[in-house]
Amino acid sequence: MLDSTPILVGASQFTDRQANPELAHSPMSVAAEAAKAALADTGIGHKLAAEIDTLAVIRIFSDSYKKPRVATSFGRAENPPRAVARKIGANPTNAIYSNAGGNTPQKLINEMAQRIVSGDVSVALLAGSEAIRTAQLALRSNVELNWHEEDAGSQEDRGIGEPLASAHEIAHGLIAPIHAYPLFENAIRKDKGRSVEEHMLAMGELFSPFTDVAADNPFSFYGTRRSATELASVTKENRFICFPYPKFMNSRDAVNQGAAVVMTSVGKAKQLGIDPCKWVFLHGCSEAKEKLLVSDRVNLHSSPAIAANSQQAFEMAGKTLEDIDLIDIYSCFPSAVEVACDALGLSYTDPRGLTLTGGLPFFGGPGNNYSMHAIATAIPLLRADPQQYALITANGGRLSKHATGIYSATPLRGEWQSESNAKIQAQINAMPSPGFIEAPSGAAKVETYTVCFDKANPVSGIVIGRLVETDQRFIANTASDEQTLRKMMQDDFLTSSGTVVSGGGMNTFTAT
């Protein structure tokens, strides 16, 4: 084991349950609380703060869209990494505000590991948080908060990142993850040949064990045990968001949660006196992207990028799926879990379980930072049994961007070296996709679809279909009357044929 080997030496989480918004933490304060706890977890405490030369903050949701997702008058931290640094007594040389995406925590760990090996980084602290629940409570109660923070110093603001939807997709309602993942889910249902009723129950059976884990997790925000039938049953409490997902099957981001990890090298850890029992090693890692637009995907029920990048991570670690003891699959919606399991060759009922935290709908979905919680949950488990290995998968966007980490407290042998993902990315980019047409006309069939709801009723239908004559893919809307939308939720709609017409940049599909 070389002194340059990167290691994780601290990790922690923080959940703010304060019901009074005036007493609750701001987003950067939530991140700072998690960061303080992560520093304490190293065993050498606050004195490590002065050693931090790189501090990265995961981009919060309200900064992840062109228009603020939770628009408030509360203000914001203008320099998030410097705001967290000030709160923990650090003054890093490098202050990074990450891109958006649930893949970002693992992606940053991969990056920092490489920079530690190269000598560019000595001690890194990565932190993220959300305080969306507090913002919602304040808005409902007409409480004014002051979350504005100005901090001097450099900031490497990496911006939102690549656009994940085209103007044409957005015009037809394919705007956010809540619209995209149901399209994947119905494509999965079609691929598996299930009826609506059969598939609803299967999703409930997939997620019911997640609720058990969440119920036992002290950091969970929605830790209630629920049966498969309860998850699959549409009720006033568990209303549809976008078919086929009732509320309980959606990532729930109205949380106040933060998590952080501390990274350094073996040599620096020795110098600082960090006990080797705290060291956790990144044995394997990789990243890959799908074709970013949903319209361009090879198909809508699988993920070549998860398959390719996870395989590269396993090869780097010298391990296979059978060697893994602890698993956390990114779980914003059932389709994210199903697609990842299929890509990994992992059974939906694997006895090792598919989540360490309880998952985004039940543990909570703290914006782009969820996977930091999964990693922070794994670290003490790995320290307790150094022979164990953990697999963490992270997913950003609309099954768009993926990162994988394989961790263990078992020391790494030889030199730590990650593989370039350029080759696997080129292979994914070269995979043939169906031709896409923006102005389709003629006989058509359904590839997948969803029905979007307001608080109580269906309001719009989105169809991704194929022209019968050319097999070109298109996106369209349906008529918005309730009779049409209710009929779409019957199990035969996936086999529907019809016609599509285009006008004014908008397409309309009518089943026959």
Image: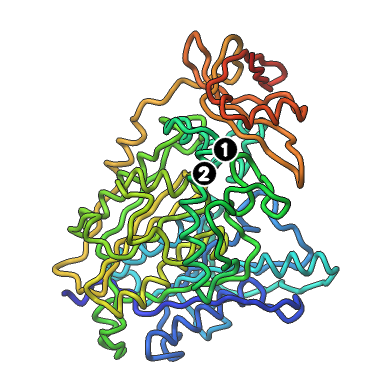
Name which residue lies at 59% across and 52% down: 250
With 432 as the anchor, is 130 left or right in this view? Answer: right
Quarter of the image containing the C terminus? top right
Q: Which colour scheme is used?
A: rainbow
Please say if 190 is above or below 422.
above
Residue 124: horizontal and vertical position, in percent? Answer: 40, 74
Name which residue lies at 47% across and 11% down: 470
In this view, the residue farthest toward the left is 414
With 310 as the anchor, is 2 left or right in this view? Answer: left
Q: Under tag 1, what secondary structure? A: loop
- Type of amino acid under label 2: Arg
Name which residue lies at 61% across and 14% down: 498
Residue 199: horizontal and vertical position, in percent? Answer: 50, 40
Alpha carbon separation for disc pair 1 and 2: 9 Å
Location of residue 42 by image quarter: bottom left
Give the label on residue 165, or none: 1
Quarter of the image containing the N terminus? bottom left
Q: Do the residues labelled 1 and 2 touch (CB within 8 Å)?
A: yes
Q: Under tag 2, what secondary structure? A: loop
Give the label on residue 406, or none: none
With 109 as the anchor, is 117 left or right in this view? Answer: left
With 343 as the anchor, is 473 left or right in this view? Answer: right
Question: 331 or 402: nearer the eye?
Answer: 331
- Type of amino acid under label 1: Ala
Please say if 103 is above or below 487.
below
Q: Name the residue under label 2.
A: 398
**Callout in the foreground (1, 2):** 2
Location of residue 123 by image quarter: bottom left
